[in-house]
Image (cartoon, grey):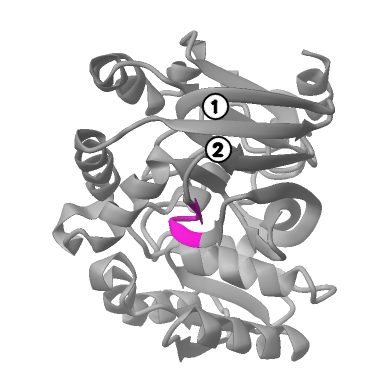
Amino acid sequence: MNSSVLLLTNPSAGGGRAGRALPSVLAELARLGVAARSELTRDLEHACALAGKGALAGERVVCLSGDGMIGAVADVLRHAPGSVLGVLPGGRGNDFARVLGIPSDPVEACATIAAGVARPVDLGEVGGRAFVGIASVGFDSEANRIANLAPARFGNLVYLYGALRALAQWRPVEFEIELDPPSERHAFTGYTVGACNSRSYGGGMRAAPDALLDDGLLDAIVLEDVSKLRFLTRILPKVFGGRHVQEPSVKAFRVREVAISADRPLTLYADGDPIAELPASIRALPGAVKVLVPAGGDAPSPAFGRAAPTTVGGDAGMAATAAERRSR
């Protein structure tokens, strides 16, 4: 690595996991020969301000945090030419790191900061704010709200807890979505609409199993109305393996942009945090930020559509090129 690192740590992420890991992370980075300047963040606004200054100074900005702060910092770095983002998992879900094949242990993940490859990654954007993973609304809004208030001791099971609690009081939403391309509208009663830049959210739920981080597109996933029993026994268990998309009530569209409206006020969540109110329009930002990914062989990655000098973990059988996906 030619430049120094600005390490931004959210000490409360993951119920304090990130803060507890910081001394060991700093020691490992030093052992690997990485010059790191450490800053603790107070909130997302503070993290973004620090990231902007670091990028301006030519530092590689590394987040030891959950996906929420990673998405906020990525939003800043997309406006800073030449900047690079590094990811050390410190939250409860850590879905962005999981999709990129970064080790779940933040100390082990330091190897990606020391020897990883900077790769262009798409972002999603809504209302001028970018996110790295999945923006979703409807049932997911309530599940996210509950999960964010849950005790830290639940770990990444907090998202399953949120889903089960939300189901008890759920009533279907009348959604309307407008897709581009193709230019078409769909109206339906259902649970959720997701605009997915990445495959995974909620601590390992593969909401969009075919989504790629370098195809310049979003996977719009729609869950139409089913009984609560069917949702609990047929849909929810399959999300963790991505097999829910085979259900008749689940529809998938590959788009550059999706506009979402509903019959009642709903909050759109992205990377686990509220990001906008409906109606909202979400679009893909191709190659908007460079992210450090593990260096390795030349096999295609499930996270990316084109072979590159990196190897990212996951099921090789789920990999597909962007061209192949567009032709389906």
Residue at 26% over, 53% down: 146
Which mark is first along the chain, 2 or 1?
A: 2
Residue linked to disc 1: 222
Percent coordinates x, y for residue 320 in the rendering: 70, 23
Q: Amino acid at mark 2?
A: Gly
Judge by depth and name the residue closer to the eye, 40 or 313. 40
Residue at 44% over, 40% down: 138
**Magenta-tinted stretch:** 267-274
Residue at 46% over, 23% down: 242
Instruction: Tell me the distance, in whole angstroms, between the alpha carbons under discs 1 and 2.
Output: 6 Å
Q: Quadrant of the N terminus?
A: bottom right
Query: For numbered disc 2, what is the local secondary structure?
Result: strand
Q: Is residue 236 above or below residue 268?
A: above
Q: Quadrant of the C terminus?
A: top right
Crowding around mark 2 (Cα neighbors within 10 Å: few <14, some 14 to 19, many 20+) is many
Judge by depth and name the residue closer to the eye, 163 or 17. 163
Name the image quarter holding residue 55: bottom right
Query: For numbered disc 1, what is the local secondary structure?
Result: strand
Task: Verify whether residue 315 appears in magenta.
Answer: no
Q: Is residue 178 above or below residue 127?
A: above
Name the image quarter holding residue 45: bottom right
> In the image, which disc is placed on residue 194?
2
